[in-house]
Amino acid sequence: MATKKKTDQDLQLDKDQLKASIVRHLRSTLGTSEQKASPEAWWKATAAAVNEQVYERLTRTQQTHFKKDTRAIHYLSAEFLMGRLTSNNLHNLSLYKVCEEALGELGLELTDLCEQEPDMALGNGGLGRLAACFIDSLATLNYPAVGYGIHYEHGLFRQEIQDGRQIERPDSWREYGNPWEICRPESVQEIPLYGYVETVFGDNGGLKKVWHAGRKIKGVPWDIPVVGFGGHTVNILRLWESRASEFFDWDVFNAGGYIDSQAEKAQAETISKVLYPNDETDAGKELRLIQQYFFCACSIKDIMRRYKRAHGSNFDNFAAQIAIQLNDTHPTVAIPELMRVLVDEEDLNWDTAWGICYRVFSYTNHTLLPEALEKWSVSLFEKVLPRHLEIIYEINARFLDELVEPKWPGNDAIKAKLSIIEEGDVRKVRMGNLCVIGSSKVNGVAEIHSKLVKEDLFPEYAELWPQKMCNVTNGVTPRRWLLACNPELAELYNEVVGKEWPLQLDKLRAVTKFADDQAFQQQFMRIKRHNKEKLVKVIKAETGIDVSAEAIFDVQIKRLHEYKRQQLNLIHIMALYRRLLANPDYDMHPRVFIFGSKAAPGYKLAKDIIYAINKLAERVNNDARIQGKLKVVFMPNYRVSLAEKLIPAADVSEQISTAGYEASGTGNMKMALNGAITIGTLDGANIEIAEEAGTENCAIFGLNVDEVKALKARGYNPYDFYYANSELKAVLDWFDTDYFTPGRPGELSAIKRSLLEGGDPYLTLADFAAYSDAHKLIDTWYRDPALWARKAIINSATMGKFNSDRSIQDYVDKIWSLQSCNVG
Ligand code: 4GP
């Protein structure tokens, strides 16, 4: 009799089985006992029990993909901001409730155990978190996909606040092991670096390039299973860890050079040591380029190995089988690396290789900020990747001769602009240009952003290749960002629209019918209230600050950057404080302003803004005169797991970037989905959020993209606003006093200087009055509970578009052409 293949049903565990498995792992895997196990051991035992399911499904997925020889997407990203995986994996395997009960019988709370898990913070912010949502959606939609990145030993720094200032501490997410990752020594790769290029005669008599590497580095893969919702497909996220090729130089060691023998090892391991929290300083440029090359080269080798296993050295099907997405410019070097492998190692001629390469790659742009479009000095490239520089020159020469010259004959200015090489004192390789030239599709991440990418950033490329530029609006996974983080609201939605919404978020639209239903409003707001009460305790525990759930919770959580304008929020709170001091009866509903934000360690002004928020908080929170009407909370160490507590409790979502600067935003989607009302500019995805929810349900304010451009073109003078608005002037002058920093006047003056003498590049002062008015509107709305509930419900119910499954389907339709693949 043929053995029957296990179905999902067969794999599903019941409570008793799971309980037995947890206890078994506690004893055998963790080597402890029920009596003396720590919460951490219980968490790891639970993870091990769940992993039995995960690996079974992973194996099934891989066998199916291999057998069906499917086209797959390879998502290359220097960052994957995964957060915690326990709750997410349990939800996606439909095991959460079962596990809760199993642990309950063992006298344990699942939510407590989940708190044992350190965040996997292998990313800085939006770009990295988007990558994490995308691999969740890819698995959920049963698309064959591999995420490729770097196995950083230390993720984004842990932020401590000392006397109001940000202090960076190392993050050690895997110090005591992480149960969700598995080392795959059988798939180790070796990659070359440095050295020189020799031209030799090839077998066919033609000339051939040989790169003699100066060093070799070993790439060790760690796989993190990515469990799709429903548990059918389990893909992998493969993260590369660097090691020295020769682990230990025995000769040197035996000759007494103990230290030297370790030096190479230490240098090699440095490559995957830390995630760069900062791309603004020159320090570490070489290391950063090596990091990028390291993970791209390992990934290309891995992709090649898998392709050749099925197709041998016939590359005719390569572009049909392989799609590679470049998540921003960080993995751009994968383009010349694939060319190198195809031409130098696989002996394809240039045109054939380029025909393949070009069809394989696509590039997503995540920001228009010029500092993010990476440039590497030619000399650095020459030293670290000499063969790649030659290849880049060749790509560039052909592009300029074959495409630019015929289109714009004799136009040297356009040639200089479109060239991959920037001329000047220091010649540079422009990775953005290389990305566009080497990709078949280029996308922005929200409608307005994609328009600006096309019209302002890359207009000539768009003219050359009108079909290349497209938009894919970002999205977030509703599994993590509603089902798991807001269980009570999830349950309410289950009752009202059924249980399909985590896959088909559009189903929530049916909830709008109840937006005016009093009983439903009460249920909805009771849940919000409960989430706020939970957050009150977290705030107290983390900061010692007492806040009341009666107040409006106004939340701004994102990286600290001038364009995101935390300073606008700050000066508005100062204005409110002044109003209250001038008139203790100033009519406003109590408000708690909550911030969560990390600043790049070298970004001085961003750190000054954090300091100012904390100093303002100290003063405001302890001022009896204002009767608790205003509170300011800065939550230290903002990260995914903290976001999961803040977002369900937010009443107001601050999305106040200068129009034209925030590519999309994804926090804006998460907060609206959880029933917060957006106060925001017409920027990034705010525009699409307002379209979905209705402008009347958002507090939109300030200059739009065209108005920002026009004001800048006219010549923006922040002093015009400073002198015209006495409140604004008084607030800015406050920065020069010692009101918030007793005995230390001037500590906050840098903020005022940046807004006046510094020219206020992000038009904070120009938008202040409109922002203040929008807040007054929010206040009026909140005082009408039925009106507020209606708006909150509509916001939550209309966010279907922002499901990352929809984004992935857009990528599939517009860029990747994948077939979903049924596993099992
Ligand atoms: C971010 C953008 O700033 C944000 O608007 C967008 O939502 C997110 O990418 C995902 O597309 N960019 C980055 C970055 O995080 O490092 O450039």
Image: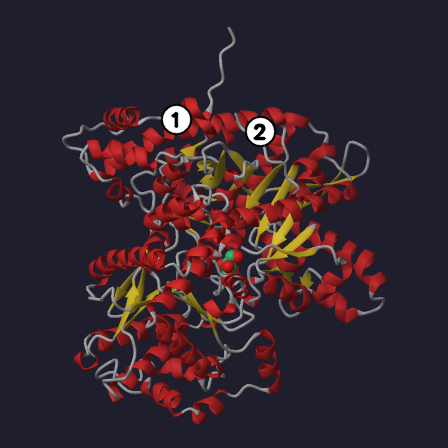
Q: Residue at x 44, y 73 (%)?
A: 565
Q: Is residue 575 left or right of residue 419?
A: left
| Residue position marked by numbered label 1 in the rendering | 12
Q: Amino acid at mark 2?
A: His
Could you tell me the amino acid type at mark 1?
Answer: Gln
Disc 1 under 8 Å from ligand 1? The reply is: no
- Judging depth in this view, the residue of 315 and 292 nearest the camera is 315
Direction from residue 92 to residue 77 in the image, left or right: right
Nearer to the camera, 147 or 691: 691
Q: Position of residue 772 (x, y in %)?
A: 40, 80
- Relative height, residue 454 to residue 742 (above, below): above
Q: Secondary structure at mark 2?
A: helix
Q: Splitting the image into 4 quarters, where does residue 183 fall?
A: top left
Name the residue furthest left.
35
Rendered location of residue 201, percent (x, y): 77, 37
Q: Which mark is residue 45?
A: none
Seen in the picture, residue 348 relative to 673 is either above or below; the reply is above
Which is nearer the N-term, disc 2 or disc 1? 1
**Residue depicted at x 54% and y 72%:** 659
Q: CA distance from mark 2 to mark 1?
A: 22 Å
Q: Residue at left 47%, top 23%?
A: 7
Q: Is residue 4 above or below residue 640?
A: above
Residue that appears at 24% across and 28% down: 26
Q: Is residue 450 visible?
A: yes
What residue sits right under mark 2 in the picture?
65
Secondary-structure class at tag 1? loop
Please identify the quarter of the rendering in which residue 554 is found: bottom left
Assess whether mark 1 and mark 2 are in contact (beta carbons under 8 angstroms): no
Q: Is residue 628 left or right of residue 211?
A: left
